[in-house]
Image: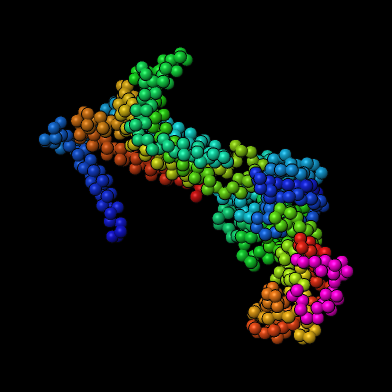
Amino acid sequence: MLLLLPQVLVTVVFFFYPAGQAIWQSLFISDPFGLKSQFVGLGNFEYLLADRFYRASFATTAIFSGLTTVVSMGVALYLAVLADRLIKGSGVYRTLLIWPYAVAPAVAGVLWLFMFNGRVGIVTWYLGLMGYDWNHVLNDGEAMGLVVVASSWGRISYNFLFFLAGLQAIPKSVIEAAAIDGAQFWTRFRTIIFPLLSPVTFFLLVVNIVYAFFETFGVIHTITSGGPQQATTILVYKVFSDGFVGQDLGSSAAQSVILLVIVGALTIVQFKFIERRVHY
Amino acid sequence: MATLKLDGLKKSFGDTKVIHGIDIDIAEGEFIVIVGPSGCGKSTLLRMVAGLETVTSGEIQINGVRVNDLEPMDRNIAMVFQNYALYPHMNVFDNMAYGLKIAKTPKPEIAERVQTAAKLLQLEDFLQRRPRELSGGQRQRVAMGRAIVRRPAVFLFDEPLSNLDAKLRVQMRLEIRELQRSLGVTALYVTHDQVEAMTLADRMIVMNDGVADQIGAPLDVYKNPATTFVAGFIGSPATNFFGTDEVTVNRNKALMSAFSDAERAVLEKPATMIGVRPEHLQVCEPHDAYLTLSVNYSEALGAETLIHGKLPMGTAITIRQNGHLPLPEGGQELGAVWSENSVMVFDQNGKRV
């Protein structure tokens, strides 16, 4: 118990206290200067759920986190399979592939923003040469695509590491046995390697969805600021923009509470339904 | 069922030569054991036959067909791995059926073949279990079953018993032999355990540093080892080796009586070794002895006693004698003779004369 105390203390101060504060605040409307507040019960929630923009933000979040998770995990798995088959120089590839993880999300966002900038972006320029007019400031789909790519990019490194470790933990002889049994590479991957990777995949799925929900704030803030027309305003970003930009602290707190419930529910669902299919 | 032929088979990893040329003709249904210490290249040899390692030079033929460049699956072989290599996420039935499913065998036939194999291996009650719910011996059987259901031309075994405890190993050894006999499938079996090699093999390949030192029936190899390595590796406790200078008493009688003219000619040269198995030495009266030893200690194993001692020039020597004979004590001086026709002479290169 004594040994757990530091961890418990950290959790209480940085998690339970703010969460409690958020729940408490979500029941009030406060004026922009924070001088007085009025108790409104569940009024903040009622107002939110009736709000068209807030409901749209749910769909945006689902699309964004779904795409980010699929892209970052898919690419990472592909790269890990390639790196696992390498005999020479695998150390170099591995190091290079891990680098992006060291870049802070906001910095990564700026990096991608530069490449796709309407006036000076190199990718935009090449796309222009090929006859495609890129403008993520105006186009919803392009904006979403860009934030998905930028948030996935740093994540690929992290996922790659876990997938590679997972692949290398599979006994070589099991793969060889499958080869002798007549399975070609793709069959082996589908029937042996992927099922044996499932604990890693499941873990990454949970971690990546949580990441897409919460930690992509920096990327979105630097690239699109939630625009155009709220097209990339995911729930977390809306918490920020309503709370700190719009100064509607009560609504912002209510949104945090809703987010808390969603993530809790998602995690329970994942453990209940997907974990059953995981072979440890 | 098939014949297997290895012709001048060599393997190098980069500049390191691991196998220096193996030749053997294996008849249909023959059980060949490749035996040798770790790192002698025996597993590499097996993996080359399986198609898991490339061949540097030479040829592998199964049923007279060159298979060097065929994928493992096209060679019609089945392999049992040291760690069994079962698919951990599949139950026993699916483990055995995996190869057949990939070969698109009709479902009723898969079921029938797996059932037959399961019956043969007493695995019928475990078909729905996962590998991790099985004991070591049962996993071993599943690995065998997976090999059997595919009805391969050649069985390959890579130290299949080394992860089992001693008692189970003896039992599985018998089962493997019986199974191979009844199925009549040609088998290539790798082990570092000379007892397994002696009991299982029709013929064995004794490997040392990538070279087949000797290929022959177990008893022939035991009786007539071709090199000091083979003489030392096959048989337990190992053969005693000593120079002629250790023969101190009755030297003329000892050296004249037991050896042929050719052997005597070699004995004159330096670095020549005499080899005698511990079971071919007997303790005797000092005046009849060829060798005198001072006893270090004796191990009484019940049925037999192992006497460990030193010869005058310091060479270690072991005598194996019947358990009911008196037990010599440490420090005691003993005389010993070898029985007729039991001594071997090896030249300076370790080759038998």
- Displayed quadrant of residue B63: top right
Please tell me which residue lies in front, A167 or A50. A167
Please tell me which residue lies in front, A113 or B96. A113
- What is the residue that sits farthest to the right in this orientation? B261
Is residue B183 among the parts visible in the rendering?
no
User: Which residue corresponds to the image point at 50% horizontal and 38% vertical from the top-left?
Assistant: A92
Residue B310: % across, % down: 68, 77
In magenta, the rendered stretch is: B245-271
Residue A89: % across, % down: 54, 39
Residue B58 located within the stretch drawn in magenta: no
- Displayed quadrant of residue B324: bottom right
Residue B234: % across, % down: 73, 65
Vertical side of B247 occupied by A17: above or below: above
Vertical side of B341 occupied by A44: above or below: above
Vertical side of A69 occupied by A132: above or below: above
Left or right of residue B162: residue A33: left
Residue B289: % across, % down: 78, 82
Quadrant position of the C terminus of chain B in the picture: bottom right
- What is the residue that sits farthest to the left in this orientation? A35
User: Which residue corresponds to the image point at 81% horizontal and 69% vertical from the top-left?
Assistant: B267
User: Which residue corresponds to the image point at 54% horizontal and 37% vertical from the top-left?
Assistant: A82
Please tell me which residue lies in front, B27 or B292. B292
Left or right of residue A191: residue A133: left
Instruction: Give the dominant element type of the magenta stretch: helix, strand or loop.
Output: helix
Residue B269 located within the stretch drawn in magenta: yes
User: Which residue corresponds to the image point at 32% horizontal and 21% vertical from the top-left?
Assistant: A228
